[in-house]
Image: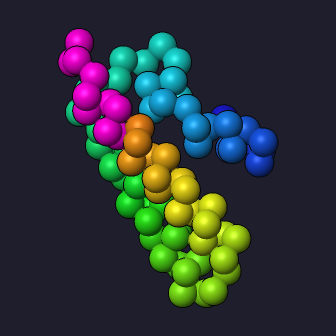
Amino acid sequence: MSRPNQADQSSIKNKPVSDLRPGAAVTFQEDIDTLKSRIAKAESARETWRVASEKEKYLEAYFMVEALELQLDQRLRQPRL
């Protein structure tokens, strides 16, 4: 399996977790756990860029955290199937 290129990675970041594995059944809890893991990684990256005084990278990471938290909130509000 090949690694996605940079363009593929940016499009992956914005997809719902359930869309990342076509044909695979993702449970509600797996979806939530994956989003929480992605949030933790994004928060770590945000803090790294803040400490390094890399404003542009910090802002990118900050908005990634915000987007992932929004996805998590929306997923938690969806009825469980």
Q: Is residue 38 visible?
A: no
Q: Is residue 72 found left or right of 42 in the rendered image?
A: left
Residue 9 location (% of width, % of height):
68, 44
Q: Residue at x 54, y 87 (%)?
A: 51
Residue 30 location (% of width, % of height):
29, 34
Q: Residue at x 21, y 18 (%)?
A: 80
Q: How many marks?
A: 0
Report which quarter residue 26 is drawn in: top left
Q: Residue at x 52, y 69 (%)?
A: 45
Whether 26 is drawn above or below 13: the answer is above
Q: Nearer the viewer, residue 80 or 2?
A: 80
Which corner quadrant holds the C terminus? Answer: top left
Whether 67 is drawn above or below 39: the answer is above
Q: Nearer the viewer, residue 48 or 50?
A: 50
Q: Which residues are magenta?
A: 72-81
Residue 38 location (% of width, % of height):
43, 51
Q: How is the image coloured?
A: rainbow
Residue 59 location (% of width, % of height):
61, 66
Q: Is residue 76 magenta?
A: yes
Q: Residue at x 73, y 38 (%)?
A: 8
Q: Nearer the viewer, residue 34 or 51?
A: 51
Q: Is residue 34 found left or right of 76 in the rendered image?
A: right
Q: Is residue 75 found left or right of 61 in the rendered image?
A: left
Q: Is residue 35 magenta?
A: no
Whether 16 is drawn above or below 10: the answer is above
Which corner quadrant holds the N terminus? Answer: top right
Q: Is residue 79 visible?
A: yes
Chief secondary structure of the magenta portion: helix
Whether 8 is drawn above or below 60: the answer is above
Report which quarter residue 15 is drawn in: top right
